[in-house]
Amino acid sequence: MIIDVNFVGLIIASIMASAVPLILASCGELITERSGVLNLGVEGMMIIGAISGFALMTVTGSLIIAVFGAMLAGVLISTIFAFLTQTLITNHVATGLALTIFGIGISAMIGKNFVGIPGKEFPIIFEGLKDTIPLLSPILFGHSIVFYFAFALPFITSYFLKKTKIGLIVRAVGDSPESASNQGINVKLVRYACILYGGAMCGLAGAYLSMIYTPQWIENMTGGRGWIALALVVFSTWNPIKILIGAMIFGGLTIIQFHMQAIGVRIPVQFLTALPYIVTIIVLVVISRDSRKIRLSTPSSLGKSFYKDN
Amino acid sequence: MNTNLKISNVTKIYPGCVANDNVSLEFNSGKIYALLGENGAGKSTLVKILSGVIIPDEGKIYLNENNLKLNSPLDAKKNDIGMVFQHFNLFETLSVFENLIIDSGEQKEGLREKIDSIMRKYNFSIDLDIPVLNLSAGQKQKVEIIRCLIRSPKVLIMDEPTSVLTEQETSELFLSLKKFSEEGILIIYITHKLKEVMELCDEVAVMRRGKLVSVSEIKNENIESLANKMVGQNLKTIKKKKEKNSSDKLINITNLNFISEDPFETNLSDINFSVNRGECLGIAGISGNGQSELFQVLSGEIISDKNSIEFDKNYIGDLNPQERREYLMAFSPEDRLEQAAIPQMAIFENVALNNYKSSNFFNNGLINENKIKEHSKKIISDFNVNTDNIELKSQFLSGGNLQKLIIGRELITSPDLLICFNPTWGLDVGAINYIHETLIKINEQNKSIILISTDTDELLKLSDKISVIHKGKLSKIMDADEVTSEKLGILMGGGN
C-alpha cells in the first residue's frame, strides 16, 4: 500500500485546525491568569463568541464585522466578570462558573433563530500554493487568517510576557498585587485589561468554531472545549509554548481516535473518546514536572481578590 | 544640597483608633533619625503617609518648603522619597533585574550599568538574573534599597528593617545607612529596638498611642530613658536570681539525629543534652541553623527514635505532640499566627484546640463551650491578655497579646517543661518584659524551660546554661555566667 503523503498532510492540517480554538482560548486565559485572575468562564465566553459571530455573519453578511463582533461580545461578557470580581470583589471561582452557565443559556436563547441556517464560506489564503510541495503544502497553505493567527499567538504571548514591559507588569501583578500597588501600578486596571483580553480571545475561539471549523450554529457547540482550554493553561504551567504542544496532542488524538473508530479498532469507544483527555494531561504533567519552574511560573496571587486598604 | 522634610499636624483616624494624633516633626539631611514606638504606636501609619500608601485625614507634608500631595506611592517616588517596607514589596517569582526595572523609566542597558555602579559603591553583591525567591532576607532588603537608590532619593525611610536580618546582616545594613547619610540622604529609621537606636541614630522621636511624646538627641538619652518614654511608665529591670539548681534530670536527649528530605531544611546531627528541674537551657544561633528542626523534634512534630528522648524517666521519642503533652510538656512555637494559633478562630476556640484530651472541653463529641470559655477567661486574666472578649478572632490580637495567650494556654496546665522558640520575636518592650518575667517565674517554681532564641540578650538574661546551634550541631553546654555575647557570636558564626 502506498501512503499518499498529501493525505498525511491533510490529516496533520485537520489536527491543527481542531487545535485552533484551544490555542486561542488558552492563550487568552493564560494572560488573565498571569495577572492573578482565575476566570472559569472560558466555556461561556467561547459560546457567546460562537453565537455572536454566527448571528452577525447571517444578519450583516460581513465576515469582518462578524469576527470582530464576536471578539467584542467576548469582551462585553468578560466585562461583567471583571466588574464583579475586581470592583465588587466577588469570588473568582463562583463568578466564573456563573459566567459559563449564563453564556450557555443566553447563547441557546439567541441561537434559536439561527439553527439550521447554513454558514458562509470563510476565505482561505495561499490557496494557489496548495499543491506545490508534497506533505507540507496542505499543512502550510490554504487556511483562514484566524488559523495563522492562532499558531503565531503562543509565540507572541511568550514574547509579550518575557520581553515587554507591559508583560512584566502583568506578571508582577499576578505575583504580588500588594507589592505592585505599592510600586504605583494600578492593579485593577491591569487586571481589567487582562480579563477583557482573555474575553476577546475566547470570543475569537468561539467564532472560529461557528464560522470556520463547522460553519453553522448548533446549541452548545463548544462541547467542553473551554474546560479543556482551562486545563491546558494549568497543566502547561502557564507556558504558552506548552499550550501549543498540549493543544496539538489533544487535537491529534481527537482526530486519530475518530479514524480508529472508523477503521473498527477493537478498543471500547468510551476509552477512545477519553484518550485525548488522559494523554494530554499526562504529557503536560510529564514535561512540566520541574517543581522549581512551576513555582516560578505559577501566578502566586491566582484566584485571590485584591482590595486596597486605606 | 540640604534636604528638609516637615510633617505638620498630621492626623489619621481609623474606626475605633486614632493612629496619628496631630503629629508634627521636622527632619534635616545629614542625620539619621529614629522613629521609636511600641507596636501600634502609629509609627508605621506615619511612614505610610510619607510614602503615599495612606492618605492622612488632616495635615501637610513639606519637602524643602514645597507642600507635597502624596496620594499614591508613585507620588512619593516622584518626590524623591524612598521607602523600604518591613514586609518586602518584591515580586518573588521575577528576577532581581525584572524587579528593579519594573518601576524605573530607564532603558535596560543603562539601568544595568547604574545598578552595577550602585552595587560596587556600597559593596553589595547580588546576582541580578536569579529569581528573588532564591535570595536571603538580607539580600532581598538590599534589592529594596537598590530600588530606592536608583531614583537617587532625598529621603530614605526604613520600616523595622532588622526584624528579618541576622546580626551580621544588621551590621552591614548599619554601615550602608551611615554611608547614605554622609552622602546627604535623609534617613528615617523606624524601630522598636532600643539598642539599634543607640547604635545608629543621631536623633530620636518617640511615639506612643498615636501621639508624639518626645524628640531628643541620642547623646542625651540612654536605653532606660527611651524605654520609659516608649512605654509611658517606669519599666522594672528584671533580673534572674541565679540559684544552685537541683541535679534532678528532667529531660535527657541522647544521640538525636534528624535527616531531612527537604533541601531547605537543616539536618540535625548527634544532639546530646539534658535539662534539670528548675533550669533554663538556652539555645542560641543564627536563624536557619536547625532551630526550627530541633523544636519540631523536641515537640514531636517530627518523630524520632524512641530512646533518643528521655523525659521524666520515660522514653518518648516516638510520641506525637499531643501524647507528649500528657507527660506534662508544653510548647510555644516560633510563628504565632501560623503554628501556634489559628488566626480565623476565636480566642476560646484556639484555647480548646490544646490539651483537648486531658481536659473536659468535650462531652460525647460535643463542644462544652461554657467550660472552654471559663477556662479561656482564666487564661486571659492570669496572663494579662489585654482583651475581655474571648470571642474575638485571634488574628485581631496584637503580637504581644497573642503570645501571652499562647504561653498562658500552655502554662495553665502547669507543665514540667516548656519548650519555646523565639517567644518575644517582634514584640514591644512591655510585652517582652512580661514574657520574660513569666519565664523566670516558671523556673522559680522548679519547672524547666528550653529556650530556643536568636536574641542573644534574651538568652543571657534568662538561661542557666547556654548552648549554640550551628549547622545542625550543638556546641558544648556552658554555664550562662561564664559566656559573653561576644563568645556566643563567635560560636554562632561557626568559630571556636
Image: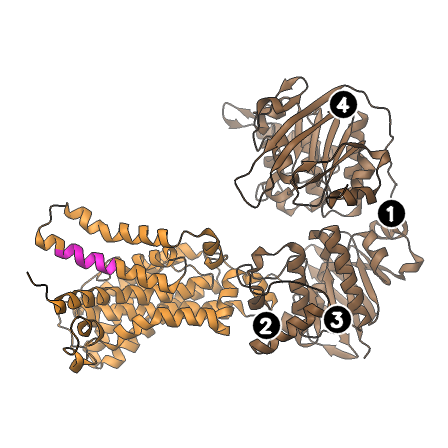
Query: Of helix, strand and loop, which one carries label 2?
Result: loop
Would you name the residue on which mark 1 appears?
Answer: B233
Q: CA distance from mark 2 to mark 4?
A: 58 Å
**Which of the two discs, 4 and 3, sits closer to the camera?**
4
- Say whether mark 3 and mark 1 are on the same chain: yes
Residue B329 occupies which quadrant of the picture?
top right
Amino acid carrying mark 1 in the image = Gln
Chain B drawn colour: brown
Would you name the residue on which mark 2 appears?
Answer: B103
Viewer-side residue, B257 vs B323: B257
Chain identifier for the orange-coloured part of the image: A
Q: Chain of mark 3?
A: B
**Which of the two discs, 1 and 4, sits closer to the camera?**
4
Query: Of helix, strand and loop, which one carries label 1?
Result: loop
Residue B102, placed above or below residue A265? below
Q: Which label number is shown at residue B155?
A: 3
Q: Position of residue B247 (x, y in %)?
A: 79, 20
Q: CA distance from mark 3 to mark 2?
A: 18 Å
* Whether residue A262 is visible: yes
Quadrant placement of the N terminus of chain B: bottom right
Q: CA distance from mark 2 to mark 1?
A: 45 Å
Q: CA distance from mark 1 to mark 3?
A: 33 Å
Q: Which stretch did the figure color magenta?
A: A250-259
Q: Position of residue B392 (x, y in %)?
A: 63, 43
Q: At x 33% / y 74%, what residue is drawn?
A: A72
Q: Position of residue A241 (x, y in %)?
A: 36, 64
Give the left or right position of residue B356, taking residue B159 as reference. left
